[in-house]
Structure formats: structure tokens, C-alpha cells
Image (cartoon, rainbow, N blue to C red):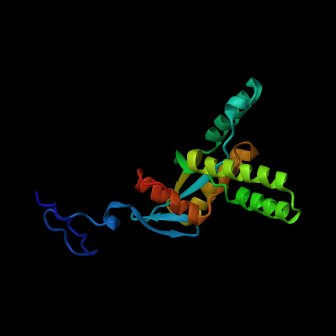
């Protein structure tokens, strides 16, 4: 049986022939990214804001009620269009790994084998966490017709969320990761 020949993608601007695959630029509705804001092909803007995650099950009943009321009030104050996105990302242990490697180096310099063994065990636990566990992260997607309108919407949402929700801006590199994951759902990051 002959292998099926993969058809190549065509260049932008050229019309598609029958059986030819569309280019990725045609499929993804994103034009560019400016100062952490995504510009869509239709000229509208969108941006991502990260919500600080909390273990709701670890809170008391009154704290749970307070958190829900705070979220409800934020939704009442912020009347513009927005979406809520939840995504699984790999656990990032870089900062912890740097700290524990520094501690391991100090233990070796002090010639303390017991402490060095304990630190190596801690490092191996961190590596296991990175390989086996992932973080569930939540984002608000806000929309605007212009960049000014979008920035105003982001400010209002951050203020409405207050310190309880901990809504923060996202660096452009992380926005890029989110967009890659959204457009390639089965691809690990």
C-alpha cells in the first residue's frame, strides 16, 4: 500500500486549489500582539488576565461564602463582555530548584553529608512534581474595540476583583503559551 502524500501549505495571498490545506494564518483569527494585547483579524482587541488560584475546599464555610460574594460583586460591577478560561499547565519548579541546588552546594561546601542527602531527596521530589502534576490556572479574557478601551476594561476588572481575586496582568511570553495551547489542545507545553 502506497503512503499517502502530504500536501504542502500554500503561500499567503494565493487562492487555494481543490484538496489543498488552508494555511495556519487563515485558520487562526489572530493578527498580532501589541504590548501584551492580542489584535484579532477583525481589528478588535483581547487580553488575558490571570486569577490567583485558591483552595476553596481548604477555607471555612464563612470564608467560602465571602469568596463567592466577592466574585459575585465583581461580576455585577464589571458589565463588559468577558470570558473565563481554565487551563492545565505544567508545574513550574524553576525557582525552587535554583534554591535547593544552592542549598545543596552549601551543604557540600560544609561537608555535611546528611544535609546533602536530605536536599537531594527534596530535589527529586520537586522533579517528580514537575513531571507528574500540573497546575489548573484560571484567566479572564477581556475584549475591546480599541486598545484604549481594552486597557480601561482591564483596569476596571482588576479593581472590581480586588485583592481577594488577585487579578494580574500576564507577560507576553505566557500569553503566547496560552494561545499556542488554545490552538493546539493536544500539544504539551
Quadrant hosting residue 100: bottom right
Residue 80 locus on image (x, y percent): 55, 48
Q: Quadrant of residue 23?
A: bottom left
| Residue at left offset 76%, top offset 26% | 60
Instruction: Give the number of marks.
Output: 0
Q: On the image, which quarter does residue 148 sit in?
A: bottom right
- Residue 18 horizontal/vertical position (percent): 13, 64
The one of 19 and 25 positioned closer to us in this rendering:
19
Residue at 23 percent of width and 63 percent of height: 21
Tell me: residue 117, above or below residue 18: above
User: Is any part of residue 54 visible from this angle?
Assistant: yes
* Image coordinates for residue 13, horizontal then vertical, percent: 26, 75
Farthest residue in the right direction?
110
Q: Is residue 10 left or right of residue 62?
A: left
Would residue 96 appear left or right of 10 to someone viewing this image? right
Q: Quadrant of the N terminus?
A: bottom left
Looking at the picture, tell me which residue is in the foreground, 68 or 94: 94
Residue 32 on image: x %, y %:
46, 69
**Residue at horizontal 15 percent and vertical 62 percent from the top:** 19
- Is residue 84 visible in the rendered structure shown here? no
Q: Horizontally, is 106 left or right of 40 in the view?
A: right
The correct choice, above or below, for 157 with respect to 25 in the image is above
Look at 73% across and 53% down and name the residue there: 120
Residue 96 against residue 133 in the figure, above or below: below
- Residue closer to the observer: 188 or 44: 188
Return the residue found at the far top. Answer: 61
Amino acid at each position: 500500500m502506497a503512503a499517502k502524500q502530504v500536501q504542502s501549505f500554500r503561500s499567503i495571498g494565493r487562492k487555494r486549489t481543490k484538496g489543498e490545506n488552508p494555511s495556519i494564518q487563515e485558520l487562526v483569527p489572530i493578527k498580532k500582539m501589541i504590548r501584551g494585547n492580542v489584535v484579532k483579524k477583525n481589528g478588535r482587541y483581547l487580553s488575558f488576565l490571570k486569577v490567583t488560584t485558591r483552595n476553596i475546599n481548604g477555607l471555612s464555610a464563612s470564608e467560602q461564602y465571602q469568596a463567592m460574594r466577592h466574585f459575585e460583586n465583581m461580576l455585577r460591577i464589571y458589565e463588559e463582555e468577558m470570558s473565563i478560561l481554565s487551563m492545565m499547565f505544567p508545574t513550574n519548579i524553576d525557582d525552587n530548584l535554583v534554591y535547593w541546588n544552592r542549598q545543596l552546594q552549601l551543604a557540600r561546601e560544609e561537608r555535611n553529608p546528611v544535609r546533602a542527602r536530605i536536599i537531594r531527596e527534596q530535589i527529586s521530589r520537586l522533579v517528580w512534581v514537575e513531571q507528574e502534576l500540573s497546575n489548573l490556572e484560571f484567566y479572564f479574557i477581556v475584549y475591546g474595540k480599541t486598545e484604549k478601551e481594552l486597557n480601561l476594561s482591564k483596569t476596571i476588572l482588576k479593581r472590581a476583583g480586588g485583592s481577594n481575586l488577585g487579578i494580574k496582568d500576564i507577560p507576553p511570553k505566557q500569553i503566547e503559551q496560552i494561545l499556542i495551547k488554545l490552538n493546539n489542545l493536544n500539544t504539551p507545553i
